[in-house]
Amino acid sequence: MNKCAWALKNVIEELYHDREWGVPVHDDRLLFEFLALEGAQAGLSWLTILKKRDGYRKAFDNFDVTKIIEYDNDKINALLTNPEIVRNQLKIRSVVTNAHAFLKVQHEFGSFDNYIWRFVDGKPVQNTWKNHQELPTSTNLSDLISKDLKKRGFKFVGSTISYAFMQAIGIVNDHTVDCYRHAQLHQHN
């Protein structure tokens, strides 16, 4: 079975590719998790974040936004000493900031899912890339989503991070056409 070239480097990325990447996500908790992880990834490899994913879940109360909005400076200082996550103050604080913004979006749209999927009318964009080098790092759509998220108070949501988020949650199907997952995900949409 052919797979996207990036997924063949190690088992962790391969499992992520086979099970999660590009699968449409509609669960708000998981959407927040991906938003937080993509922000944490800025300037680092995705493999680094995948290796720390369980640590992030423990450190951030399984990405429960109602708990995260209660984090105070003591909690943030404790997180800064946690070796199971990326210890970057701006990135850690952005998770708390984003939890507040996330709740506002949920209140306005009924769910974050309703909000984020309206950008594509609820249907994933089916791309037809022949090889991994063709994949963009940002698009007009990620520019639009990034701008809207920033306007709503989100941090670490630049266009490149927003595009990686879109890929992770299946707003775009960026599996290459020779990858077995491309056809599987295309059929389900």
Image (cartoon, grey):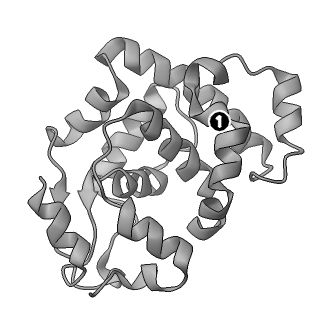
Q: For label 1, count other residues whose C-alpha is less than 10 Å away and answer few (under 14), some (14-19) or many (20+).
A: many
Name the side, left or right, on which 30 lies relative to 2: right
Name, please, the residue furthest toward the top.
107
Q: Nearer the viewer, residue 149 or 178?
A: 178
Q: Amino acid at mark 1?
A: Ser
Mark 1 element type: helix
The answer to whether residue 129 is above or below residue 189 is below
Q: Is residue 59 left or right of residue 177?
A: right
The residue depicted at 42 percent of the width and 49 percent of the height is 162
Name the residue rendered at 25%, 57% in the picture.
172
State the residue at coordinates (85%, 46%).
Answer: 82
Above or below 170: residue 154:
above
Q: In the rendering, at what x and y percent does residue 88 appear?
A: 78, 48
Kindly indicate the quadrant of the structure image that contains residue 76. Answer: top right
Q: Quadrant of the N terminus?
A: bottom left
Answer yes or no: is residue 34 visible. Answer: yes
Q: Percent from the top left, x then y, of residue 161?
A: 48, 53
- Look at mark 1 in the image and give the residue it sits on: 94
Q: In the image, 129: left or right of 31? A: left
Q: Quadrant of residue 131?
A: bottom left
